Amino acid sequence: MTGERPGDAQPTRHVVVMGVSGAGKTTVARGISAATGLAFAEADEFHSPENVARMRSGVPLDDATRWPWLRDIAAWVAERGAEGRSTVLACSALKRSYRDVLRQGPLRVDFVHLDGPAEVIRARMARRQGHYMPASLLESQMATLEPAEPDESVLVLDVSLDPQALVAAAVSGLGLPVSARVGE
């Protein structure tokens, strides 16, 4: 894992790349991490085995199954922040209330919403292999998605752009410093 170290002069930054399954969250978040040195985490890795089994069988998660997962993710971000490390996280963060959990506390948390047409996302889901989230749950995720409200720090990017362009737009749009290690 990469990230800033305690003693760095800059305050920590925390970025959540959000959107429905198949939008490219993990690819873009990993790209941001590579470009900036922010510590990366995949929210899917915080799911309980029971949540994974539900999704694998085509049953969408509800709020009751999401709250413990979101609290675990928020705790991970807070722990990194307490260590003086900035983070980038791939997480659906579909509802305002979910985003509110992730931004609790004194840390600055910005969101990058990968948004676009369902047909583009569905095509991406059909091409990916080894992921437990079936394309059949895309509609439930799109129905759950709540667009950002004006008081939220959310940069909306067009999911139809290629991953490199999305990473560049996110880094630029959020004013993230590019790591000196990039290109070495």
Image (tube, helix red, strand yellow):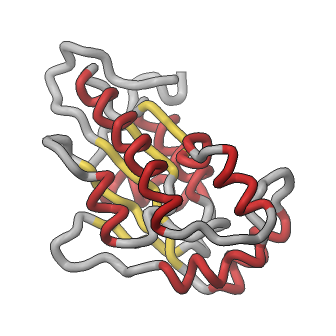
Indicate the quadrant where residue 56 lies. bottom right
Compared across the picture, whether 73 is left or right of 28 comes to: left
Which quarter of the figure has residue 4? top left
**Residue 174 visible, this angle:** no
Residue 146 x, y percent position in the rendering = 39, 80
Q: Left or right: where does residue 103 sit relative to residue 122?
A: left
Residue 12 sits above or below residue 184 on the image: below
Q: Does residue 173 lie above or below 97 as drawn?
A: above
In this rendered view, identify the residue nearer to me: 42 or 165: 42
Q: Position of residue 63 (x, y in %)?
A: 46, 67
Q: Residue at x 31, y 76 (%)?
A: 148
Q: Residue 184: where, in percent of width, then height?
A: 53, 21
Q: Position of residue 128 (x, y in %)?
A: 81, 59
Q: Residue at x 29, y 34 (%)?
A: 78
Q: How many marks?
A: 0
Report whether 44 appears left or right of 55: left
| Residue ID at (35%, 37%) | 75
| Front position in the image: 142 or 168 | 142
Left or right, 39 with respect to 183, comes to left
Q: Residue at x 31, y 43 (%)?
A: 14
Instruction: Point out the residue furthest to the top here.
Output: 7
Which residue is more in the foreground, 148 or 105? 105
* Residue 139 can be seen in this image: yes
